[in-house]
Amino acid sequence: MKSMIFDDNGIIEKDITYKFKILLLGDPAVGKTSLLVRFIEDKFDEKYIATIGVNFMVKNLNIQSEIVLLTIWDIAGQAPFTSYRNLYYRGCDYVIFMFDIVNKQSLLNLPIWINNYRRIISGDVNFCVIGNKSDLEHLRNVEAREYSMIFPPFQDKMSFFMETSAKTGENVDEAFDIITTQLITKAKNKKTQ
């Protein structure tokens, strides 16, 4: 499969070295779509529009002369979509579980999201946890000490935790850089086994 890459010399066509499917999961209104749009298009929209079912976007990255195709699936968090949600889990390479640092319940619901995913998909799929809306520090309703109560049961597959702001872009690219690097390393290790 080939991909069109833009560089200083214009458009070039290169073979895709790696393709990865990443899921965004979490309660409604935690900023999944905003994080995705910030990463893909470097934009932010103040209006909240609930995702209906699923939305996905694609991004090509050129990392050390290798072309990486990320397909990022933004799965609706609303309860009516629970039965459909499970269909999109198949074939995923990584999961980003998100909560909103202003909405404590969204953090408390993370174990439900993580356990549901792990019940449906077995295997070697790692995940990270992202606390979004760090730009609203003055409204924070989740304290760092609370993370230590939520995360320990999931440490076996949880690769990192980070706070981001889809609004300002803080740590968004950094989170996806870590994820992509981990996925490439894992893929290379599988090739050598």
Image (cartoon, grey):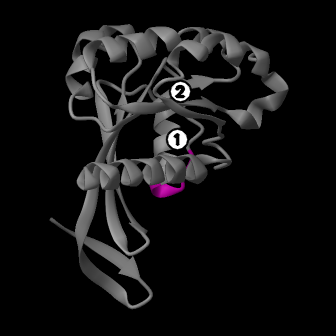
Q: Residue furthest right?
A: 138
User: Is disc 1 surrounded by few (<14), some (14 to 19) or many (20+) residues within 10 Å?
Assistant: many
SS for callout 1: helix
- Give the residue at mark 2: 98
Residue stretch rendered in magenta on the structure: 40-44
Residue at image point 58% right, 23% down:
99
Q: Determine contact: label 1, label 2, CB under 8 Å.
A: yes
In the image, taking residue 118 as reference, residue 36 lies left or right, namely right
Q: Is residue 83 above or below residue 89?
A: above
SS for callout 2: strand
Q: Which mark is residue 35?
A: 1
Residue 157 shown in magenta: no
Residue at image point 27% right, 73% down:
4
Q: Is residue 117 above or below residue 109?
A: below
- Quarter-wise, where is residue 90 in the image? top left
- Quarter-wise, where is residue 129 in the image? top right
User: Is disc 2 surrounded by few (<14), some (14 to 19) or many (20+) residues within 10 Å?
Assistant: many
